Amino acid sequence: MSEQTIGPRRRSWLVIAPLLVFAALATLFAFRLGAGDPSRIPSALIGRVAPQTVLPPLEGLANAKGPVAGLDPAAFKGQVSIVNVFASWCVPCHDEAPLLLKLSDDKRIKMIGINYKDSTENARRFLGRHGNPFGRVGADVNGRASIEWGVYGVPETFVVNRDGAIAYKLVGPVTPENLEKVLKPEIEKALRAQP
């Protein structure tokens, strides 16, 4: 082969090689990011008593029984509780809201909300639009309580046993599929557990 033929080939490999390396790395990163189910992120709080954080009520929020109370850790004792961390600005929270409202029909469980870094007016409007599934809603204005709960981002949902210990954590929105296949079985397990 002549030097003219080899020269352009080498130059084309010098251009193609970095592109191939980049494509391989991009594929690897995409695979690793997509391979994990974020709802299966383990929580160091599983089996531990729920954070003893007191949060004020969402100002002006009421239901048929009167003003809705804030978050009080004493409320976890004696009944299985579902704690949902939500915000009006969270798009998946809008999607899961009807499912939480349906879940609140189960009188064996107590529904508790933690409103994360939200304005009072927007949070009340959100619950007014979708319906309020919560018997208590604590306003976590600065996000510190959510950090204590180990929240990665909204929405997240916790199952808390009758003894006040966290039994399960669902990262991401409640969907029809994970409600039936994951969350309801975890609730049933918590209901069967002895306090």
Image (cartoon, rainbow, N blue to C red):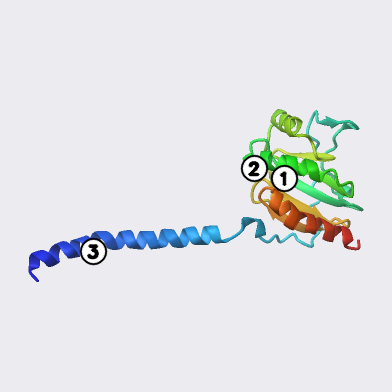
Across and down, in percent, residue 173 comes to 67, 47
Q: Vertically, is 29 above or below 129?
A: below
Label 2: few (<14), some or many (≥20) within 10 Å? some
Question: Marks 1 and 3: which is nearer the front?
Answer: 3
Q: For the residues marked 2 and 1, what is the alpha-carbon distance in whole angstroms?
A: 12 Å
Q: Nearer the viewer, residue 4 or 46?
A: 4
Q: Vertically, is 83 above or below 19?
A: above
Q: Looking at the rendering, in which quadrant would you find the N terminus?
A: bottom left
N-term-proximal mark, 2 vs 1:
1
Secondary structure found at label 2:
helix
Q: In which quarter of the image is residue 140?
A: top right
Q: Can residue 30 be seen in this view?
A: yes
Q: Which mark is residue 13?
A: 3
Lateral position of residue 182 relative to residue 27, left or right: right
The residue that mark 2 highlights is 92
N-term-proximal mark, 3 vs 2:
3
- How many numbered marks, from 0 up? 3
Q: Can residue 150 be seen in this view?
A: no
Q: Residue 85 carries which label?
A: 1
Tell me, yes or no, whether the two marked residues, 2 and 1, touch with CB atoms within 8 Å: no
Across and down, in percent, residue 87 comes to 68, 39
